[in-house]
Image (cartoon, rainbow, N blue to C red):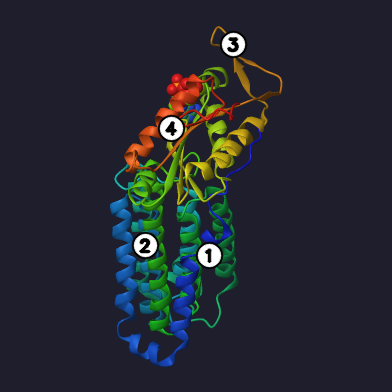
Amino acid sequence: MRLPTISRRPLSGLIAPGGLLLLAAWALHREEPVRLAMATYSSYFCFGTLAAAALLSWYHNYVRILCLSVATGIAVWSFTELSKNPEIPLFIPALLLPANFILFAWIVERGVLTISGLIKLGVIALQVAAVFYLFQYGGTRLESLIGVSPGAAWTWMPSAVLFLFAAAALYLLVLAFRRQTKIGPALLWALAAVFVALNQQKSESIFLYAGTAGMVLMLGVLEHGYDIAYLDELTGLPSRRAFNEATRQLNGPYAIAMCDVDLFKRFNDTYGHDVGDQILKMIASRLSNVRGGGRVFRYGGEEFAIVFRKRTAAEVLPVVESLRQAVADADFVLRDSRVRGGSGVRKPSPEKLLKITISIGFADRSDRLPTPELVLKAADDALYLAKESGRNCVRYAMAPVPEVTG
Ligand code: GH3
Ligand code: MG
Ligand code: MG
């Protein structure tokens, strides 16, 4: 089935807020007096934000961000502590950091206190131990152990490190577009911030940019948590919780429309739940083109709600009618799928067009319906009326709308 994809995250979602934070850090860093004033506190800022990001990730059960916060902290610590000793090569922690970003962006999130989570924490603990070992035994011993030559602070990164950072950036960019969660852009911007950090000469500059990475990770976790609470995972539309909050804030004139897919159970039973999900995504995509200032929510199951602020029933009617028509006119092309046979065994079906319709009931605020709860109840009653009237039609709460039929 080929369906339009839903653009949940426009390009602006990739830029803000990580990009803005990095820009702010750069602007602050350019100002000599600010830099000097911050110098004493920059390490507190850096390790404070990284610790906060780690704790927040623990609280939200995101072990990957927790690991990356610790990995960034360790890299920064080794850069600012080990670099005082020119015997010790810096590129080991520098190489580990982008490798960690690739690893933890790639592996699946399974929470903190799970076998998989503990393995991830083990990987980071090993790295912490390795860096402390490095610190303890210095460069000469390490050189004889793994055959790397000691390096001092660099003016520009060695090409192996640069290459790994570029590969990590590319991978995270692709993931940010493909996975469409707030974690993707956060990882990308955090990587950019640590890249800038590791190219600084002064400790306070390293701390400033690495602390910015901590803030970016922290914001990523918070934004992702917000999305989980307020966005529907399947369709990307605002969820029932968002609807409840939006209706609580309504005042003045407004209208609410309830849309329900007609005979949807039959589609599920015939083509399977996956095709049913695709149909819901497609309908969500059509409904989100709503005009007239409407805001669409996934109310639950195969029901969608549209809230029209500052609109009356007369203004809303043509809008919801055109939505109903748009869904009814759409062709759902079913390809490479299997239709369920009568015996329950699946058998191949040729390509075919599916026709899907929705019914809509709507109501607006009036003296008889003074609260959002009453308007919603009336819209629901009108939806029931639309179903009773044969489906694929629009009905108004107070009286059937005679001229609009499917
Ligand atoms: P009506 O025209 O009267 O609304 O009939 P209907 O079949 O659409 O209504 P009914 O309430 O009997 O069935 C709704 C179905 O929607 C049942 C449920 O399995 C399906 N459904 C609800 N949520 C989802 C979902 O997220 N994905 C899929 N694939 N199906 C869902
Ligand atoms: Mg229903
Ligand atoms: Mg239905």
Q: Quadrant of the N terminus?
A: top right
Residues at marks 4 and 3, CA–CA distance in whole angstroms: 41 Å
Label 4 vs 3, first from the N-terminus: 3
Nearer to us in this view, 133 or 384 = 384
Nearer to us in this view, 285 or 401 = 401
Label 3 vs 1, first from the N-terminus: 1
Label 2 vs 1, first from the N-terminus: 1
Q: Are marks 3 and 1 in contact (CB under 8 Å)?
A: no
Q: Residues within 10 Å of mark 2 (few under 14, many from 20)?
A: many
Picture layout, residue 203 above or below residue 396: below
Residue most extreme to the front: 367
**Residue 274 position in % (x across, y down):** 54, 28
Q: Which mark is residue 397?
A: 4
Which three-letter amino acid code belongs to the residue tagged 4? Answer: Ala
Q: Residues within 10 Å of mark 1 (few under 14, many from 20)?
A: some
Picture layout, residue 311 above or below residue 281: below
Query: Is there any visible trace of residue 76 in the rendered image?
Result: yes
To which residue does mark 2 refer? 218
Picture layout, residue 106 above or below residue 377: below
Which residue shows up at 62% across the image and 34% down it? 325
Which three-letter amino acid code belongs to the residue tagged 1? Answer: Ile
Which residue shows up at 41% across the image and 46% down it? 109
Q: Which mark is residue 176?
A: none
To which residue does mark 3 refer? 341
Q: Residues within 10 Å of mark 4 (few under 14, many from 20)?
A: many
Which three-letter amino acid code belongs to the residue tagged 2? Answer: Met
